[in-house]
Image (spheres, rainbow, N blue to C red):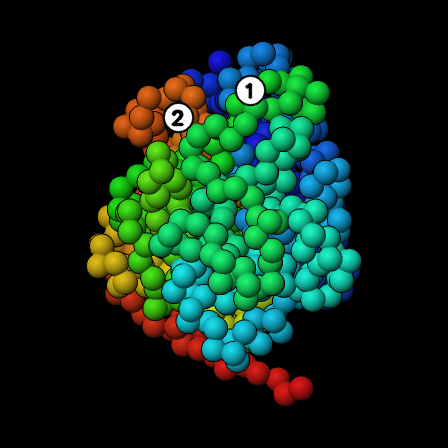
Amino acid sequence: MIVLAIDQGTTGTKCICFDRDQKIVSSHSQEFPQHYPRPGWVEHDAEEIWECTLQAARRALEGAGISPGEVAAVGITNQRETTVIWERESGRPVRKAIVWQCRRSAEICSRYRDQGLEEEIHRKTGLVLDPYFSGTKLTWVMENEPEVARLAQAGELCFGNVDSWLLYRLTGGRVHATDASNASRTLLFNLHEMAWDEELARIFQVPLSMLPEVKDSCGVFGETDPDSFLGISAPVAGMAGDQQAALFGQACFRPGMTKNTYGTGSFVLMNIGERPRLSSRGLLTTVAWSIGGKATYALEGSIFITGAAVNWLRDGLQIISNVAEIDELASQVEDTGGVFFVPAFVGLGAPYWNPRARALLIGMTRGTTRAHVARAVIESMALQTCDVVEAMVEETGIPLKELRVDGGASVMDMLLQYQADLLGVPVRRPVISETTSLGAALLAGLATGIWKDLEEIEKGWRVDLETLPDKSSSERTRLMRRYWKRAVERSMDWVLEE
């Protein structure tokens, strides 16, 4: 009995087969092209995403000799906010997908802000008014592509984030739906009513007929079409945005439980229970998941650049030849030597949300080496995380007891030790590092009876590494936090005249 998790990310798709013991049986990753039509614009070809998903799933199954009939359920997790529009009848995308990273709708956000709509949008959605989210991307399409707008008004088009697109293709075009966690990332979904909001749809110029049906994250969305999907006929029974799926995969089922994913960027999510709590500190309120008609909510801090800064060391500064070198290089020095790095290459996300901030490397002397710079890049990941966690604790009043971590950079023990020192709590890395895929699989397996309940799932979560805070470093970490905040302030003050 196998649960197939489809983890569709920004640069590729990973398909993982999990067994009843939550163990990985096989997996395969497949990359697909990125499209950059103009500076600041990022697009994907939705057909390329589908073909990439098919290849990844095929090779994952073949790698372990798994037959189509052994797949008991399918779960989907996905890059969020990326906007796909396709013809309802033919299933043909009418344009390339607009990726979450794309900034083309920045002027639309400014216009709505000037119209005084920001507070209402935040109150209803829990989100900030930013090009990051799907709603303003749709507005841009409606205002700039008249034929697409005409077809949309005529009810001939479907919109969805990548989860909806994959579900549509997996089911042979029979199901146009999404789950509550993905719906909550669109600027069109009312958190309090758990439904699409007609007033928000009017503001963002989106016909309600385009929007997918919103379902529980854990439940049967439809059956895969064997003619479309590798001969597999199985329920698609779990769906969640990638960061919410990681929270579920980390078994953060109780209020106050918190995880951080160190990826290209980093995403800190705290379970806040069954009532949405709006943030005044630059955090997002989002649906974590919905089970049995009951939503669990989370506070989220989106950090734009963490692991991507390591790529900059490799490709931009060329002080390392591959990403894996950074840990060894940074270990050559005991500290940064007073160097701080603020990775505001695309502005700053939570809790600052300052699009005009600029990256900054400060505190260098003649004795600064590339090892100090490498360590400063690693420490910036932990310092940014600390900023977000601090805001979460202040807003909820819930003290942090531990931080569960995953993502590519979580393999660096140095990073996890510094993170524990800064936060003053244990940092725990699980045995299964693919928590996003695991979350999708667990949601699907829970819906189909493979796992009985959350308690059974929680028992399957196991620690690979526990890092405890070094009490002797508390004075130094307090000092580093103060200097770090000064560096962040400098990065936000750095404005070049047009």
Q: Determine the image quadrant of residue 351.
A: bottom left
In this picture, is 481 found above or below 68? below
Q: Residue at x 27, y 28 (%)?
A: 455
Give the residue at mark 1.
234
Q: Amino acid at mark 2?
A: Leu
**Residue 373 visible in this rendered orientation of the protein:** no
Q: Residue at x 35, y 34 (%)?
A: 292
Q: Residues within 10 Å of mark 1 (few under 14, many from 20)?
A: many
**Kind of element beneath mark 1:** loop
Q: Determine the image quadrant of residue 173.
A: top right
Q: Using the image as rendered, state which of residue 357 and residue 464 is in the foreground.
A: 357
On the image, the x and y values in percent for residue 101 come to 61, 58
On the image, the x and y values in percent for residue 296 come to 33, 44
Give the residue at mark 2.
446
Q: Is residue 117 left or right of residue 93?
A: left
Q: Is residue 446 left or right of residue 85?
A: left
Q: Earlier in the sequence, mark 1 or mark 2?
A: 1
Q: Residues within 10 Å of mark 2 (few under 14, many from 20)?
A: many
In this picture, is 337 found above or below 297? below
Q: Amino acid at mark 1?
A: Ala
Q: Which numbered disc covers residue 335?
A: none
Q: Residue at x 60, y 18 (%)?
A: 233
Q: Using the image as rendered, state which of residue 73 and residue 164 is in the foreground.
A: 164
On the image, the x and y values in percent for residue 359 come to 56, 70
